[in-house]
Image: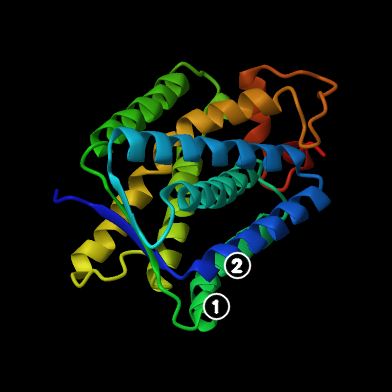
Amino acid sequence: MTEIIARRQFAPCYIYLDIAFLVLFASLLVWKKKYMTVLVGFVMGLVYMVVDYGIFHLICHSRTIQGGSMFWVLLWMSMSYGFTNFAWIWLWLSKDSHLIEWSTLILTWWLSCPMISKMLSHGEASIIIQRTTGEYHGWMAVILFVGYAAVIVFNLTRNKKEQRVSIPWILAIGVLVQFGWEASLLIGGIRSAGFESMYDKFATLVVNSLLETNLGMPYVYFIFAAITARFNEQLKRRSVKLSLADRIVENNAPFKSSRNEMN
């Protein structure tokens, strides 16, 4: 496989518009008392910053930027996609009864924001930021395989089907969340801007969708099950603490079950 380059080009007003959306999204989650979802999104935004700035930039030296500050642009990017992606993933895993509304809000914003920012930019100089992937995609593949292998071994040790992790469910979440993000950026002219080859444009879309968020899904699912076995969305202790297996059984219940949301 040739080098995969993840590249974005956008006007500075894109950042300000997206920050406004993050405030709106977080406010709506708080309004609906999705406190755990907000906390998870914020924590994962910080984790994204550690990975993107600390590992990809400082250690791997795979990041370059034109027209902006590496630290501040990566801080925004990490909090933006770290918060949005993992809040969305948490809502998926929780089988939230308003998942369609949350998903529509996120996807329409990802698609609309690049177009709105271009309309408002008035010829502002673009920020161009990119990273190469040759230094770490192999390690990502290791994490991906180990995670899903652990899920498979876990399922093979379960005699009851309802105690098994739904591999198609977590695989769909891991691929589709990243695909929604990548496809929206590509359509909006943010991702792979300046690339002439269609292969270069779509290689990033396909490889990142299959690998980057998906690699963490097995680990995220077990963390989700362990935390929500003890606490509800309002961060209160559950009246009956469940085992990991029992929480998986509960989460495997029908999609709109109120028990999944634990309000």
Find disc 2 in the rendering and name its residue: 17
Number of numbered discs overlaid on the protein picture: 2
Please report the residue visible at 65 percent of the width from the left and 56 percent of the height from the top.
Answer: 22
Please report the residue visible at 41 percent of the width from the left and 22 percent of the height from the top.
Answer: 150
Asked if 50 appears above or below 32 in the picture, the reply is above
Q: Quadrant of the C terminus?
A: top right
Q: State the residue in front, 157 or 56.
A: 56
Find disc 1 in the rendering and name its residue: 116
The x and y percentages for residue 228 are 69, 28
The x and y percentages for residue 111 are 51, 70
Badge 2 element:
helix
Instruction: Determine if residue 161 is in view.
Output: no
Badge 1 element:
helix
Asked if 149 appears above or below 261 in the picture, the reply is above
Which residue appears farthest toward the left when viewing the image? 2
Instruction: Determine if residue 263 is in view.
Output: yes
Disc assigned to residue 156: none
Q: Would you say the residues marked 2 and 1 are in contact, meaning their CB atoms lie under 8 Å apart?
A: yes
Q: State the residue in front, 257 or 101.
A: 101
Q: Amino acid at mark 2?
A: Leu
Which is nearer the N-term, disc 2 or disc 1?
2
Please report the residue visible at 57 percent of the width from the left and 69 percent of the height from the top.
Answer: 108
Q: Amino acid at mark 1?
A: Ile
